[in-house]
Image (cartoon, coloured by chain):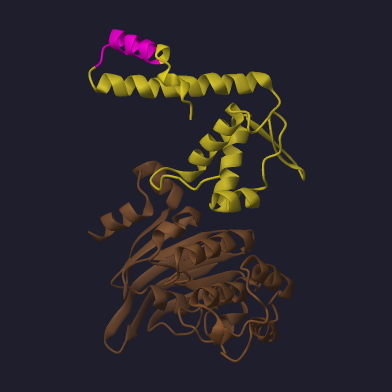
Chain colours: A yellow, B brown
């Protein structure tokens, strides 16, 4: 895990985003155990209190469950994971569209541009 | 846990701290930042009971600090003040003999984590490894208050990273508070809960770091630059 947090945004939410993406990519599977708070702190080089807050936040969204004395696990509820997948997609699209609008592109131009981009297979290079 | 009330500290006629009020609670890693000579080290020494305030009171768990507060406070000095003819193991044993709260097993664990050889002579240790040894000695004590004066100063990035990781691994946040003075903000900002900026003997800001990020979109460096303007 690399250490590229932005210092001007809350670390707990950046760490939550990172875990969400790992779940989306399937690096963390439903039912998988997350590292303990301290292990995660060491891995990500952040304060254990921050990790604690990240886990609490994810718990609040039902993305993970903490079982007393056992640890924190990725939920096995497919509905919740599906919802997260949709939500993150909407967020990313919304960010992109706002950026395009801010530069003055029309909806039609955005649509055409995106389609052409995907067809030309520029989109093939994933992260 | 740590309380400074209306504390002024003068050296001759010069005030190192002026009417400082500060309260810190356990379970946190707190950074004390500011320019050279701003009063950071003086604040730590007052809490460690190594110097007395000219006015006001400094207490740890309700007890006014003097040299006896060492029972509750583990203090990492900016200076290197160990016996060169000792080796690493003997230095650890010596510290264990000085402090009843010194946990030898924990010291061994941290020593191994820091990859320090028990048999290495102190005078032959690199500056980085002396820095690591200081961390071993400071964190092995089971006390409520840990004070670290410039633990990263003058060390190379690899060593700084191992020290930061060592802190995350071995501090006991359920029972301890860690107060760190530093210039190396970039290295340490990801592990701070709170930050205090000090300028010319005044505390000019005290914040929860995550709040600073979410409410003002500021990292510590940007915040400090703003405060110092």
In the rendered view, tell whether residue A9 sits above or below residue A62. below
A110 relative position to B172: left or right: left
Identify the residue shown where x is 65% and y is 76%: B117
Q: Is residue B71 magenta?
A: no
Q: Position of residue B145 (x, y in %)?
A: 57, 70
In the rendered view, tell whether residue B219 sits above or below residue A76. below
Q: Is residue B61 visible?
A: no
In the rendered view, tell whether residue B127 sits above or below residue B152. below
Identify the residue shown where x is 36% and y is 81%: B9
Camera-side residue of B197 and A36: A36
Q: Position of residue B198 (x, y in %)?
A: 34, 67
Q: Position of residue A25 (x, y in %)?
A: 58, 28
Camera-side residue of B220 and A109: A109
Camera-side residue of B64 and B50: B50
Quadrant holding the N terminus of chain A: top right
Camera-side residue of A12 and A2: A2
Q: Position of residue B194 (x, y in %)?
A: 46, 57
In the rendered view, tell whether residue A61 sits above or below residue B7. above
Task: Spot the residue most to the front.
Answer: A120
Q: Is residue A44 visible?
A: yes
**On the image, which quarter does residue A68 sit in?**
top right
Label tally: 0
Q: Which residues fall within the magenta stretch?
A: A105-117
**On the image, which quarter does residue B28 sit in?**
bottom right
Identify the residue shown where x is 43% and y is 16%: A121
């Amino acid at each position: 895990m690399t250490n590229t947090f932005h210092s001007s945004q809350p670390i707990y939410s950046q760490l939550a985003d990172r875990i969400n993406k790992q779940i989306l990519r399937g690096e963390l599977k439903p039912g998988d155990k997350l590292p303990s708070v301290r292990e995660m702190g060491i891995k990500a080089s952040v304060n254990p209190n921050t990790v604690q807050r990240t886990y609490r936040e994810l718990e609040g969204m039902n993305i993970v469950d903490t079982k007393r004395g056992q640890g924190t696990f990725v939920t096995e509820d497919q509905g919740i994971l599906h919802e997260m997948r949709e939500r993150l997609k909407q967020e990313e699209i919304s960010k992109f569209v706002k950026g395009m609008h801010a530069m003055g592109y029309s909806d039609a131009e955005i649509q055409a541009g995106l389609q052409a981009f995907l067809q030309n297979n520029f989109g093939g290079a994933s992260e | 846990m740590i309380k400074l009330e209306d504390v002024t500290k003068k050296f001759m006629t010069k005030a190192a701290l002026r009417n400082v009020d500060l309260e810190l609670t356990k379970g946190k890693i707190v950074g004390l930042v500011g320019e050279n000579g701003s009063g950071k080290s003086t604040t730590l020494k007052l809490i460690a009971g190594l110097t007395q305030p000219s006015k006001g009171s400094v207490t740890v768990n309700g007890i006014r600090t003097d040299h006896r507060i060492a029972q509750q406070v583990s203090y990492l000095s900016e200076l290197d003040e160990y016996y060169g003819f000792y080796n690493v193991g003997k230095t650890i044993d010596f510290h264990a003999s000085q402090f009843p709260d010194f946990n030898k097993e924990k010291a061994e664990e941290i020593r191994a984590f820091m990859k320090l050889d028990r048999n290495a002579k102190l005078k032959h240790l690199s500056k980085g490894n002396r820095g690591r040894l200081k961390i071993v000695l400071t964190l092995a004590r089971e006390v409520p208050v840990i004070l670290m004066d410039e633990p990263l100063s003058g060390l190379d990035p690899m060593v700084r990273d191992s020290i930061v990781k060592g802190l995350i691994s071995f501090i006991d946040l359920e029972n301890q508070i860690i107060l760190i003075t530093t210039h190396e903000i970039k290295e340490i900002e990801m592990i701070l809960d709170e930050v205090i900026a000090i300028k010319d003997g005044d505390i000019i800001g005290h914040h929860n770091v995550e709040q600073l990020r979410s409410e003002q979109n500021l990292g510590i460096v940007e915040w400090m630059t703003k405060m110092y303007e």
